[in-house]
Image (spheres, rainbow, N blue to C red):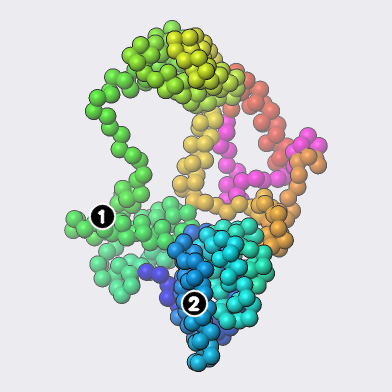
Amino acid sequence: MRPRVLAELVGQRHLLVANSPLRSAIEMDRVRSTILWGPPGSGKTTVARIIAEVTRSHFATLSAVLGGVADITDIVAAARDRAAFTNQKTTVFVDEVHRFNKSQQDAFLPHVEDGTVVLVAATTENPSFAINAALLSRCIVLRLESLSIDDLVVLLERALADEVHGLGALRVTADADALRAIAERSAGDGRRALSTLEAAVDSLAAESSGHVSLQVVAAVESHRPLLYDKTGEQHFNVVSAFIKSMRGSDPDASVYWMMRMLEAGDDPLFVSRRMIVFASEDVGNADPRALVVATAADAAVRRVGLPEATYALAQACVYLACAPKSNATGLAWHRAKDLIAQRGALPVPKKLCNAPTSLLRDEGYGLDYRSPHDFPGGVVPGERYLPDELADVVLYEPVDRGEEELIRRELAELRAARQRR
């Protein structure tokens, strides 16, 4: 279901618009050694295959996972013979080139430099760090971006309609919102989107409808594990009672259920781990010391063991039960997770990107970043740190209990200061 010609390629408009350097090089059969850098499923291998189809050079492939210096030597020898006897160029595509070690990458250097081969390599890693400087200097670097939701929908619609290379022969239909849901959950990855569509279609094999609905997509995309235990129901009921008693601020019930677990032979480290989680999940910044107390109890269990560590466990249990409660931090990360599931991996604003190399600075990384240390109160007026699409989103909302009441007031002032121009 991959695109096979330039006209079918979705996304990467910045690289493939009419008269762009890459498009012109492909169409004129003048492709130079190139590093295709981009996230999974953005089309790196597809671009390489299109180069193979469009250009007149011999196309050799090499996987950096399986290949080595000997394979490179064989490819170069064949390329040299091919050039001598047929005057045909050789383009070598190396997938996951960042997995090559220094000596393997160095093996390409003289042959790229003298034109024996044209190297087209794909990597998901930053070339500044993953590719030898000597090899990098002999190649152009092209950055591929994650596919947009609209691009992915086009890819999915084409796959459903294509009777030769896609799923068209199956006469399957799909709701527009189902295809969009697949696109949104694929995080800009075309391969993942197509695989999900294929799995959704496969799941219809036992049905007569042949129709991909939102419900079908949800079933295919479900990653929730199956929870089951044939003998431990009572154990988990006691654990549940322990957690809910601490959450309900009842120290008496909390220490009772904790001792029920310990007396039944539960691992004390299991108990301490549950309290560490609770300290952040249910107390949070209403009392930041709760996490310190819980982790100290865990350290005491590891240091002295039972029965002496029971004192530390009971101390932590009672402290957590009596502490003011807030689940604001838990709600914050759950909201963030839901946003990611709904909107995918939105790009990091370039001003916030790390820019340790000239290549990255040329890409616009770090441009216009303003340090809060240079502004009164340590706040940059009008600055945004979330992706532009989420500029007005609020994830963390402190409660009016415990120390979060102070955080609530201070955070309101900080947010107001950032909104001022």
Image quarter of the C terminus: top right
Rounded to the nearest angstrom, the CA distance separating label 2 from label 1 is 43 Å
Q: Is residue 144 visible?
A: no
Q: Image quarter for residue 366? A: bottom right
Location of residue 210 in the rendering, given as x and y in whole percent from the top left corner? 24, 60
Dot 2 or dot 1: first in sequence order is 2
Determine the residue positioned at 48% across, 59% down: 40
The 10 Å Cα crowd at callout 1, few under 14, some 14 to 19, many 20 or more, is: some
Q: Image quarter for residue 374? A: top right
Along the horizontal axis of the image, is 276 left or right of 260? right
Location of residue 216 in the rendering, given as x and y in whole percent from the top left corner? 30, 51
Location of residue 158 in the rendering, given as x and y in whole percent from the top left corner? 38, 69
The 10 Å Cα crowd at callout 2, few under 14, some 14 to 19, many 20 or more, is: some
Along the horizontal axis of the image, is 352 left or right of 18? right
Please name the residue that numbered disc 1 is placed on.
203
Instruction: Determine whether 254 is above or below 166 in the image.
Output: above
Closer to viewer: mark 2 or mark 1 = 2
Question: Would residue 270 be counted in the magenta stretch?
Answer: no
Image quarter of the N terminus: bottom left
